[in-house]
Image: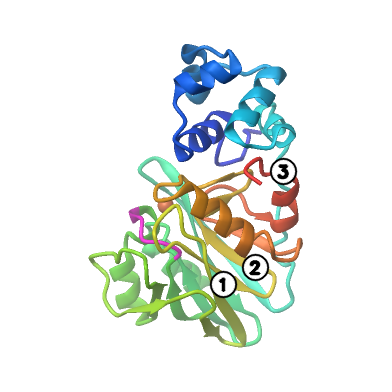
């Protein structure tokens, strides 16, 4: 079976290095790893030794033991139970966008069969088909952030469902969308009997946010199993907001990211080298 994590060792050290604005030269000075070998590691063509993993972790302020498990491909999150909550169901819609898979989710209130669409996975047709197959009634579209791979096709979904669409106040708005409703941290959105709370998770984008209900959190590109999204806006905001607003939740809370497999708060606390 192929290693299922969204990010490999090379992605992780590249994100940490660029996010903290550390040059290849600085790393070479600190670790003795040549610039050429470092480049090859970031491009996945050179496997590091255990000693190199620990040296890199130290200079990049990552957790060495957790990073080693990913470098040696010895950890993957235990698959999340899809029926692990009595109050809600989650359907994952994963489709390719620009050659890479992206996840959207349908959150279903079991008591009422009302549903929220979380991001669009760039394929509204598939989402509409899933809503139909599962005989649920969509009442809201929740956007974790406005990158195209998560919002492409939003107008078609809006037209087909007439749902109110929620996006964070600080997030750039998708140009093609209409009827956007702005939210901020701690706002609550009702989906049937489910109360969905908005959590600030900026850093990947200015107004990136997550949506928490009961034992499920939809986290967009704030955190991936074993990694984080690219810290395009602020590395420190991304690390701090994920630590404070997501990893502070109970261990059993399931995290559904925009890319890669689902995981849990407990798994990430034990295995994510950024924390
Ligand atoms: Fe993104």
**Does residue 20 lie above or below 258 as drawn?**
above
> What whole-number distance in Å separates the C-alpha atoms at marks 3 and 2?
19 Å
- Magenta-highlighted residues: 144-148
Label 2–label 1 contact, CB within 8 A: yes
Q: Which residue is mark 3?
A: 271
> What whole-number distance in Å separates the C-alpha atoms at marks 3 and 1?
26 Å
Q: Could you say where residue 201 lies in the image, as x and y percent from the top left?
A: 51, 61
Q: Could you say where residue 102 lies in the image, as x and y percent from the top left?
A: 46, 51
Residue that appears at 32% across and 59% down: 152
**Crowding near pointer 1: few (<14 within 10 Å), some, many (20+)?**
many
**Crowding near pointer 3: few (<14 within 10 Å), some, many (20+)?**
many
The kind of secondary structure element at disc 3 is: helix
Q: Which residue is mark 2?
A: 216
Q: Which residue is mark 1?
A: 107
The kind of secondary structure element at disc 1 is: strand
Q: Could you say where residue 5 lies in the image, as x and y percent from the top left?
A: 60, 40
């Amino acid at each position: 079976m192929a290693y299922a994590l969204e990010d490999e060792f090379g992605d992780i050290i590249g994100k940490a290095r660029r996010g903290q604005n550390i040059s290849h030269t600085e790393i070479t000075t600190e670790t003795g790893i040549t610039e050429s070998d470092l480049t090859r590691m970031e491009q996945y063509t050179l496997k590091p030794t255990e000693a190199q993993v620990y040296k890199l972790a130290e200079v990049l302020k990552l957790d060495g033991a957790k990073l080693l498990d990913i470098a040696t491909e010895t950890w993957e999150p235990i698959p999340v139970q899809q029926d692990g909550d009595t109050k809600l169901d989650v359907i994952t819609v994963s489709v390719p966008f620009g050659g890479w898979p992206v996840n959207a989710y349908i959150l279903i209130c079991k008591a009422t069969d009302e549903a929220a669409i979380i991001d669009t996975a760039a394929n509204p047709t598939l989402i509409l088909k899933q809503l139909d197959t599962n005989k649920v009634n969509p009442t809201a579209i929740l956007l974790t952030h406005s990158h195209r791979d998560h919002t492409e096709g939003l107008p078609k979904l809006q037209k087909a469902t007439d749902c109110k669409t929620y996006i964070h106040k600080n997030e750039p708005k998708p140009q093609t969308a209409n009827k956007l409703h702005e939210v901020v941290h701690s706002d609550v959105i009702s989906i049937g009997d489910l109360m969905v709370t908005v959590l600030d998770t900026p850093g990947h984008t200015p107004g990136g946010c997550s949506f928490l209900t009961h034992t499920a959190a939809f986290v967009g590109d704030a955190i991936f199993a074993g990694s984080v999204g690219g810290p395009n806006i602020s590395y420190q905001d991304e690390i701090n907001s994920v630590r404070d607003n997501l990893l502070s939740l109970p261990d059993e809370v399931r995290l559904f990211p925009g890319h890669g497999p689902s995981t849990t708060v407990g798994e990430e606390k034990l295995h994510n080298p950024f924390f």
